[in-house]
Image (cartoon, coloured by chain):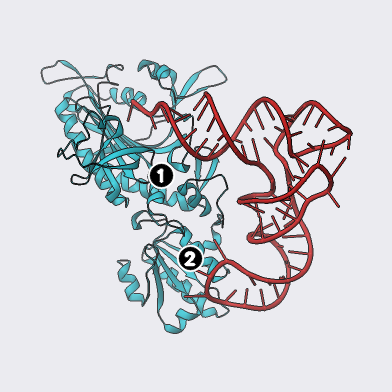
Amino acid sequence: MRQSTLFTKARKEAPADEVAKNAKLLIRAGFVDKLQAGAYSYLPLGLRVLKKIENIIREEMNNAGGQELLMPALHPKELWQTTGRWDTMDDLYKVTDSSGRENALGPTHEEVVVPLVKQFISSYRDLPFSVYQFQNKFRMELRAKSGILRGREFLMKDMYSFHKDEADLALMYEKMKGVYARVFERLGIGERTFLTFASGGSFSKYSHEFQVTTEAGEDTIHICDKCHIAVNKEIIEDQKNTCPSCGDKNLRVETAIEVGNIFDLKTRFTTPFNLMYKDEAGVEQPVLMGCYGIGLGRVLGTVVEVLGDDKGLVWPTDIAPFAVHLVEIHSSNPEVRKTAENLYTDLSNHGIEVLWDDRELRAGEKFAESDLLGIPLRVVISEKTLTGGTLEVKVRKGGEVRMVDRKELFDSLKIQ
RNA sequence: CGGGGUGUAGUAUAUCGGUAGUACGUCUGCUUUGGGAGCAGAUAGGCCGAGUUCGAUUCUCGGCACCCCGACCA
């Protein structure tokens, strides 16, 4: 993409009322725009990142056997009354239309997915299976905060699995721990992501959260470095401050942000909707259920919090908006433009996503903005590199600068 | 929802009970072109409502919005 055609522009200064690092950097760089507290637009650059995160998660959910679908955000009141959550869930958005009909804006989708799958489940032969979606959730946070980390409307991947018995549910539950670990690994924050024991589970006395350590975190977790797991503050006292896995007492305290969670819901939602199946003996049994969530915007914001530096954003390769930032230093010599254009075409033809800064701005401004955007690899084309016959490559993370030829550049991008 | 803070141009800021200033941006022209340039000119602003006052952006009250702390967050 030619940067001259990009409708957003980077700003030198962040809005005065933003304190959160993720909001400051993402707004300055033109990745997101705040519509109101807790509701953000994703602009072209930010959306590219969000979509890459989505695709990684999609691949992993498909590998885990999930089947993608998409459910509405608008839910009839009756479904939420069936589970009792119309009255008990404080942060439920309730909307009334002009005919007086009441609806909920979905904060989660158990109330929709259970009646949905009920149409297709009658026998043990129909189980198990999992469905998932990427969908905007609505939660009336009394205090939206921390930039995109805690929104009132936010994109979430939510998966629901259905099982004939606890053993089968437990199997899936354990499997999802591994799947999630791989997701966060691929998203570039694996080292800092901890499987965290939390309260709320049905059959094991825990549920599990996936927490990423960062100062911007709202939660406190107690980490066992030996096992690379953690314990939530809620249950640390019950645990007598020991690791639930190895029993070690040397737990490290850190603040962290919850980017995902898994719950064994069992029959919490299937019973109210009378979701049953017939077992091998022809006896009606309740279907068991698990759910598994990941907040995509929160993941994006967390990556910014963890990797962003004083110069701006820093994207992991797999979720960067572009692989290469081709920075052309404007020159009266037409060869500079020609060389840049050729490389742009060349790389693009090899499937490399390139943002080409073809604008007639001063070099300093371009470099500063390039740092801010955080694209992993910068290639500079200028009068200087022209005469040398080489390309100047700078790695955003770490700032290493190298002079390379075309072949070396292509090798580093894993293309021929 | 309790407490605190802030609302001035597209952005960041200053001043002031009496003509609202600066920087960046944007527009025009010229120069410049390897770390957010220079000169000249132009553009654009007091959150909303009520009150006090001869006069309110400034003081008072109310509302709204945003930010922070807390509570809340299957």
The cyan-tinted chain is A
Judge by depth and name the residue closer to the eye, A350 or A243: A243
Tell me residue A67's x, y (percent): 28, 37
Which residue is located at x 56 percent, y 44 percent? A17
Which residue is located at x 17 percent, y 31 percent? A170
Identity, as a three-letter code, of the amino acid under mark 1: Ala
Judge by depth and name the residue closer to the eye, B4 or A351: B4
Question: Does residue A223 lie above or below A142 as drawn?
Answer: below
User: Which chain is disc 1 placed on?
Assistant: A
Identity, as a three-letter code, of the amino acid under mark 2: Trp
Question: Does residue B8 lie above or below A237 as drawn?
Answer: below
Helix, strand, or loop for circle 1?
Answer: loop
User: Which chain is disc 2 placed on?
Assistant: A
Q: Is residue A416 visible?
A: no
Tell me residue A146's x, y (percent): 46, 41
Is disc 2 surrounded by few (<14), some (14 to 19) or many (20+) residues within 10 Å? many
Is A353 on the left or on the right of A130, as rendered?
right
The red-tinted chain is B
Give the labeled residue for mark 1. Answer: A216
Is disc 1 surrounded by few (<14), some (14 to 19) or many (20+) residues within 10 Å? some
Give the labeled residue for mark 2. Answer: A356
